[in-house]
Image (cartoon, helix red, strand yellow):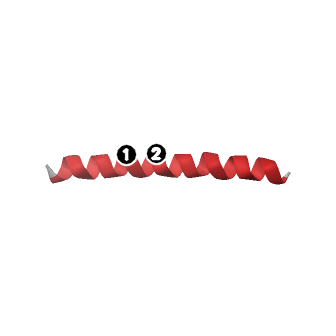
Amino acid sequence: MLRKRFVIDTVNNKIKTSYQVEHSRHCSFGNF
């Protein structure tokens, strides 16, 4: 049960991080 929760948290963090990277990338484009 705890392991499943850990996997879900890990996946959520990966999605969140990749979303932030995409977002900051778009912001960088606007600066150039």
Query: In the drawing, what numbered circle is on residue 19?
Result: none
Residue at image position (71%, 46%) is 26
Q: Report x, y in % for residue 10.
A: 35, 50
Q: On screen, 31 above or below 15?
A: below
Viewed as shown, does residue 28 lie left or right of 32? left
Tag 2: amino acid: Ile
Real-space Cα separation, disc 2 to disc 1, in angstroms: 6 Å
Determine which residue is flagged by label 2.
Answer: 15
Q: Residue furthest right?
A: 32
* Crowd band around label 1 with a 10 angstrom C-alpha radius: few (<14), some (14–19), many (20+): few
Tag 1: amino acid: Val
Residue at image position (28%, 47%) is 7
Dot 2 and dot 1 residues touching (CB under 8 Å): yes
Determine which residue is flagged by label 1.
Answer: 11
Residue at image position (60%, 50%) is 21
Viewed as shown, does residue 19 lie left or right of 28? left
